């Protein structure tokens, strides 16, 4: 049987592909390449170019590859963009998720793992945040994910689709072997931007607000290594296959770091002192959010391997240097990857 990974050419999705292949699983990737990269998908994982909302395409993939499980990453993820374009986010994240869930139900998929977010909690009143905390998003991005969660739960109860909803906190870092990493066309994640600044791709880094109710005035987040997050998905898949009931889990480490602490860590690990500028707050940013992930550890047996901010930064920095070498050797790696991907189709 095969695992269908939507958004598998993207940052987190490509690490999930690596995790599954390393575990001996069969994988097929569906991605429209709007933000992902064809070269990020290993040659032994078929890449199909298309949208999750294309039910005819998804149904054909499920039948052709005998898909047993779907891990759904494909989504728009930038909080400020969702404030500017809420309808676009509801279409891409919520409407397309509904179409994908319906396809899964109609074509006999047994297990569904959904990529959700800590943004569903909004500005939580208690830290660390447990899975039963109130869900009160403060951005269209958070709402688009929460709506998808609700649809998946309802479909699960009505049609017996066993599922896991994983709520991510701040994902960062890169594959320790430098096989994949964050390669956004326009980076928005703090650690990615900070390491880009450290290697000279940016002149400075902006800090959006220093007047939050936190010790140093900047936002506090729980940063989780992308490879640990991929491992959590694999453990969730094992859990569902073994007969575990549907569940919702936080994925984080349970410790928060401020924006300024992260920047200081990047400076220390890289050995580069770069410019930092304070900018106005961004709409939709919570002041402080840290995970309680005890449930994931207890139910899945999940044991993080890279629970250390300096390690996360070091892997992200190594990936930036790897990107520099790749770009020098092959200016258009996507074109080469698409030419080699005989299974890719529009």
Image (cartoon, rainbow, N blue to C red):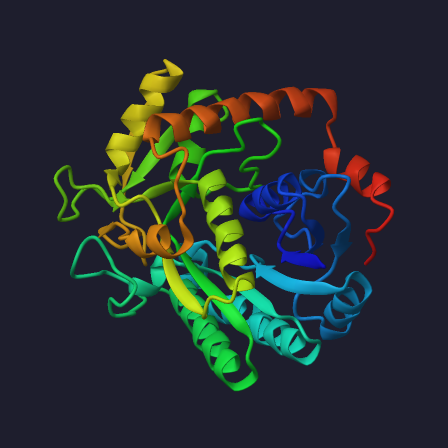
Q: Is residue 139 visible?
A: yes
Residue sitting farthest toward the front: 242
Q: Is residue 299 left or right of residue 40?
A: left
Question: Residue shown at 48%/82% (left/top)?
Answer: 157
The image shows residue 164 at horizontal and vertical percentages of 47, 64
In which image quadrant can residue 345 be found?
A: bottom right
Q: Is residue 294 left or right of residue 150?
A: left
Query: As rendered, which of 289 and 69 lies closer to the eye?
Result: 69
In which image quadrant can residue 44 be found?
A: top right
Query: As rendered, which of 37 and 134 lies closer to the eye?
Result: 134
Residue sitting farthest toward the bottom: 158
Q: Is residue 311 left or right of residue 288?
A: right
Question: Residue shown at 56%/44% (left/top)?
Answer: 11
In which image quadrant can residue 334 be found?
A: top right
Q: Is residue 85 visible?
A: no
Question: Residue shown at 21%/61% (left/top)?
Answer: 124
The image shows residue 55 at horizontal and vertical percentages of 72, 74
Q: Is residue 164 above or below residue 80?
A: below
Query: As rendered, which of 4 and 203 lies closer to the eye?
Result: 4
Quadrant for the C terminus, please: bottom right
Tell me how many marks there are. 0
Q: Is residue 312 above or below residue 157?
A: above
Quadrant for the N terminus, please: bottom right
The image shows residue 43 at horizontal and vertical percentages of 77, 39
Question: Residue shown at 56%/66% (left/top)?
Answer: 112
The image shows residue 263 at horizontal and vertical percentages of 31, 29
Q: Is residue 75 above or below residue 152?
A: above
């Amino acid at each position: 049987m095969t695992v269908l990974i939507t958004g598998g050419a993207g940052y987190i999705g490509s690490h999930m592909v690596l995790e599954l292949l390393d575990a001996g699983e069969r994988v097929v990737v569906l991605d429209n390449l709007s933000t992902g990269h064809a070269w990020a998908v290993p040659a032994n994982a078929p890449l199909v170019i298309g949208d999750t909302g294309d039910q005819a395409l998804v149904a054909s993939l499920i039948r052709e590859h005998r898909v047993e499980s779907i891990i759904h990453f494909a989504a728009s993820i930038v909080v400020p963009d969702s404030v500017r374009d809420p309808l676009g986010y509801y279409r891409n994240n919520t409407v397309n998720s509904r179409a994908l869930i319906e396809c899964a139900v109609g074509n006999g998929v047994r297990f569904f793992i959904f990529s959700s977010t800590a943004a569903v909690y909004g500005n939580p009143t208690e830290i660390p945040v447990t899975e039963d905390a109130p869900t009160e998003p403060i951005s269209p991005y958070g709402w688009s994910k929460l709506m998808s969660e609700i649809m998946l739960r309802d479909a699960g109860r009505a049609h017996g689709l066993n599922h896991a909803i994983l709520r991510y906190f701040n994902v960062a870092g890169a594959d320790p072997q430098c096989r994949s990493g964050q390669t956004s066309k326009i980076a928005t994640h703090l650690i990615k931007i900070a390491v880009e600044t450290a290697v000279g791709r940016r002149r400075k880094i902006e800090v959006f607000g220093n007047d939050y109710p936190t010790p140093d005035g900047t936002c506090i987040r729980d940063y989780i290594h992308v490879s640990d997050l991929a491992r959590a998905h694999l453990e969730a898949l094992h859990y569902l296959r073994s007969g575990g009931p549907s569940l919702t889990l936080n994925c984080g480490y349970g410790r928060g770091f401020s924006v300024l602490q992260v920047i200081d860590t990047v400076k220390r690990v890289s050995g580069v002192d770069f410019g930092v500028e304070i900018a106005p707050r961004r709409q939709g940013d919570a002041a402080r959010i840290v995970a309680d992930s005890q449930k994931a550890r207890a139910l899945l047996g999940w044991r993080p391997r890279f629970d250390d901010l300096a390690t996360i930064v070091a892997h992200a920095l190594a990936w930036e240097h790897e990107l520099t070498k790749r770009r020098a050797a092959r200016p258009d790696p996507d074109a080469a990857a698409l030419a080699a991907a005989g299974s890719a189709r529009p």
